[in-house]
């Protein structure tokens, strides 16, 4: 009897040590388990470098001329209506890649919903892209949580500059169709600095 107890205790100890080791080594593992409460909008001229080149939104949006044009990426809604993000000049685009099983995605969703309520739909378009391509499940999730966020699925290949494999990932495109924000990990989008960042974008 004692040996069984000790073996169980040893097993739990080994699992605990393994998890602790992963968390110490991998920041992505921490994000997956705990999410991230704050956001730094990555405003690198090259979105590929955004994971290592990060700036806070404290200084406001940079000059749009410094950023590359968003590529032609097509998404579709539940009715099959497609939208090409490269042809949406005049609007700020908030593109969020997420999944219903992703804890940090779920954690940040209320703040995204509140952020949307701060602005008119003619100024900012919110595209909540389900990476599982399961519109029925993801739209049900939105309805159950009373989120006013439109679900999209991909209708074309998503470039790695937008989505490298980590979710949630958010891409922000300004009125001129240029990438001005790229963030991997959960965030609080009702942070006053973030809200101000979007106000500055729509005022241009």
Image: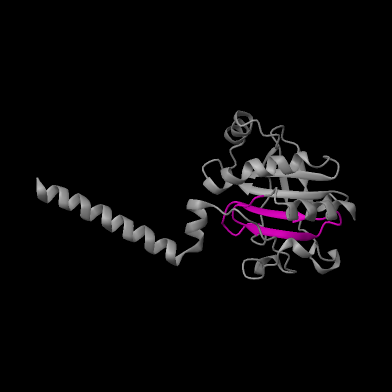
Q: Looking at the picture, does residue 57 appear above or below residue 5? A: below
Q: Quadrant of the C terminus?
A: bottom right
Q: In the image as oriented, which residue stretches furthest toward the left?
A: 1
Give the camera-side residue of 187 and 32.
187
Q: Quadrant of residue 129?
A: top right
Q: Is residue 132 visible?
A: no
Q: Looking at the picture, does residue 79 appear above or below residue 34? A: above
Is residue 184 shown left or right of residue 24? right
Give the camera-side residue of 10 and 72.
10
Q: Is residue 34 visible?
A: yes
Q: Quadrant of residue 19?
A: bottom left
Q: In the image as oriented, which residue stretches furthest toward the right?
A: 204
Q: Which residues are magenta?
A: 163-188
Image x and y of residue 200, in percent: 84, 55
Q: In the image as oriented, which residue stretches furthest toward the front?
A: 192
Residue for point 69% across, 65% down: 47
Image x and y of residue 10, in percent: 21, 55
Residue for point 80% across, 62% down: 60
Residue for point 47% across, 52% down: 33
Q: Quadrant of the N terminus?
A: top left
Q: Looking at the picture, does residue 139 appear above or below residue 21? A: above
Image x and y of residue 9, in percent: 21, 52
Query: Is residue 183 found inside the magenta-colored segment of the image?
Result: yes
Query: Is residue 76 found inside the magenta-colored segment of the image?
Result: no
Image x and y of residue 11, in percent: 24, 54
Color style of the picture: one colour
């Amino acid at each position: 009897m004692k040996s069984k107890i000790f073996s169980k205790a040893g097993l739990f100890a080994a699992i605990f040590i393994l998890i602790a080791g992963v968390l110490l080594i991998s920041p992505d593992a921490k994000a997956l388990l705990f999410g991230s409460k704050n956001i730094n909008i990555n405003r690198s001229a090259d979105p590929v470098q955004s994971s290592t080149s990060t700036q806070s939104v404290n200084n406001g949006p940079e000059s749009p001329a410094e950023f590359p044009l968003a590529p032609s990426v097509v998404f579709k809604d539940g009715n099959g209506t497609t939208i090409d993000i490269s042809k949406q000049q005049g609007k700020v685009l908030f593109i969020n890649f997420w999944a219903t099983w992703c804890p940090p995605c779920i954690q940040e969703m209320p703040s995204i919903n509140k952020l949307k309520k701060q602005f008119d739909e003619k100024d900012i378009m919110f595209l909540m892209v389900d990476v599982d391509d399961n519109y029925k499940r993801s739209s049900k999730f939105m309805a159950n949580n009373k989120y006013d966020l439109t679900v999209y699925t991909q209708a074309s290949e998503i470039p790695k500059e937008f989505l490298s494999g980590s979710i949630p990932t958010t891409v922000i495109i300004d009125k001129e169709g240029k990438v001005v924000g790229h963030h991997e990990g959960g965030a609080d989008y009702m942070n006053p600095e973030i809200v101000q960042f979007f106000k500055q974008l729509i005022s241009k």
